[in-house]
Image: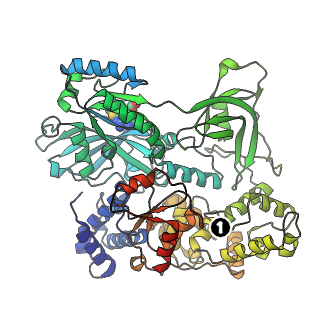
Amino acid sequence: MKAWNTKDILQVTRQFLESDEFGNKNNIDLLREVLNFHEWKYYVKNDPLIADAEYDRLFQLLKNIESAYPELIIPESPTQRVGNALRKDFPVVEHSLPMLSLDNSYNEADLYDWSKRVHALCQTDDVEYVVEPKLDGSSIALIYENDLFLRAATRGNGIQGEAISENARVIHSIPLKAGFSVSNISKVEIRGEIVIAKDTFKAFNHERMEQGLPIMANPRNAAAGALRMINPEDVARRGLTAIVYQLGMAIDKHGHSLLGSEILSHAQALQVLESAGFKTTFPELKVCNSINEVLHIIHEWDSKREHFPFETDGMVIKVNQFDQQKKCGKTAHHPRWAMAFKFKAKQATTRLIDVEYQVGRTGTINPVAKLEPVALAGVTISSVSLFNEDLIKEKKLMIGDMVLVERAGEVIPYIVKPVLETRTGLEKPIIFPTQCPSCGSVLFRSNGEAAWRCINATCPAQTIEKLKHFVSKNAMDIDGLGEKMIARLYHLNLLKQIPDIYTLDFDAISRLEGYGEKSAGKLKMAIEASKHQALYRLIFAMGIRFVGQQTAKTIAKSISNLKDLYKLTDEDLMQLNDVGHKVASSIVDFMATPSNQMLIETLESLGININSDSSLTITNLPLAGKTFLFTGSLQSLTRSKASEMLEQLGARVMNSVTNKLDYLIVGKSPGSKLAKAQAISSIKIMDEQEFLKFTKDL
Ligand code: IVH
């Protein structure tokens, strides 16, 4: 990463944003550098300097210049992450050094034994260890030559992996141009892990559920599966992060290795990678002089890992100095200089009582296992998703089975396997229905899809799910119209389709049992208020396939009225950041469908806002560039409301404490973020009252 200081980069950024002449083709390299810098701040440092909308404008500027002068497009341009390349196969490539696995330890004695072996191999007791989290994702090898990204490969069998470069390019924490030349490195091979942040994974699953798609069992599977997806656009939507943990090879322009000569230790190698622009394990790394110190760090992490943004299944302990690593050597499977310490898995056994089948918004049939309630990592679990028929078959599950349930971190629990040894012979097979449990229509399963679907457009369960989605928190956010109420109104024929929400018979509602004029009045107000929601919420609420909240925001920013979308083509939409062919054609199809156009017309005539407020230029907003974080629960508004309010003022809401965080807002029963923020003097800490006053006074 070029050593920009904040003042300079902001000044150049402003010039691009504010002066039309400055954004010309002669400044294209500078513009790319500026975009790379902001991408690094956002994706690697989690500490953005500018608002999303400003980044989008810079990105669009570069796109415009490149489309006027296509001869200036270079592969490492920030616009070239998602290419058009779809591939059905991934060529097999050789790793420059085998990608070994790690030996595992499970207790203190294992670690003491290992360190004795290390001391014997190094012929000294003077050994420095480094400890870092073991990231639970999918491993990757990256090659750069002359600072440019060349290739990414999966681990494969350790000797050969699959080249998945197109998919790696869409991961923004993998720089397309990295700063190796300042360290005299001409060619490197780096190893790391592709992971999904717990929050991103939760949101991703939430969106899949809302789209009627089966949810993913854990972030590891979601990351590993994503890397081998055929369409890089799908990979981009997984929100993957690359965290690198090893410099496998580093050679200078004469072909000499720099490892052990100029770069002497693992810690130093990670520093080189940090300054080259990567996200690494360095911020978490601890150097220790004894196994006792190592154990102390491991114990700290046992509770700390709950708050770590990524899933960890253990810690990795490595010999720090490369000359000592060399003395330790390796076996065919693992290096002798490293050892993984595995945390105890959060598992429990319980009985599978029954399987229920839920119908999703798009008609997918989601099998849900009903379990005898069991306590697991602080929560009681009584039902878990079984995802689809194939997974049930693959795991050979039967009703009545004792099953092993696992919950990794804060992730949704899932069934690992049945405990076959405890079968009595009384277990019953799970028979997947052939008809929709809601409307009785025959179910279909298309080629290549895992899910069975009900394709009856008037299926009650689907309609209720569509209504639930429309009013949900991240969509039109109508309080007082919960799941039960929607189902009740539907069955009373008071609410049959989306526009009915805005013509509800409140007299009839106030006469319902358990309901009065007061609650009917409140509901009326919430529905009225939803008419003025921001356009992106309506776009998301309509439930267009593949259009999640983020994509809805991108689209809303690019149009001034919802009906503008009728005219946009695939190509127009693909100009938008992170919108590829699949999303674009889904939007075009949706907008071309007469019943959807009718829905939009009807909503407009009922007074629902279909205009975008994108005329607000984020640059001039009072909190532009400022970062906020919440801890504890707020009393007078929800976190998502508060976050939205901040975003509208130009601020960004972060998910962890870093030393560049500007404000921490402390609610009731704050968590560990408070102590962390108190240790950093530049962070301003406010309670809820102060925060409300602060935003009001802006
Ligand atoms: S160092 C042996 N460090 O764990 C090669 N590996 O079970 C050196 N992993 O294949 C590996 N976090 O994908 C190392 N901080 C970390 C790691 C890590 C996760 C993965 C890696 C490896 C697997 C071994």
Question: What type is the residue that disc 1 sits on?
Answer: Asp
The kind of secondary structure element at disc 1 is loop
Which quarter of the figure has residue 548?
A: bottom right
Residue 650 versus residue 86 in the image, above or below = below
Which quarter of the figure has residue 164?
A: top left
Colour convention of the picture: rainbow
State which image quarter holds ligand 1. top left
Residue at x 75%, y 73% (from the top left corner): 522
Q: Quadrant of the N terminus?
A: bottom left
Q: Which of 652 and 277 lies nearest the eye of the viewer?
A: 652
Residue 484 coordinates in the image, percent (x, y): 78, 58
Q: Is 561 on the left or on the right of 399, as rendered? A: left
Which quarter of the figure has residue 502?
A: bottom right
Is residue 24 in sight in this rendering? yes
Q: Which residue is mark 1?
A: 477
Q: Is 444 on the left or on the right of 256, as rendered? A: right
Residue at x 44%, y 59% (from the top left corner): 654
Residue 196 coordinates in the image, percent (x, y): 46, 47
Residue 615 versus residue 132 in the image, above or below = below
Is residue 395 in sight in this rendering? no
Residue at x 81%, y 50% (from the top left corner): 438
Residue 223 coordinates in the image, percent (x, y): 47, 43
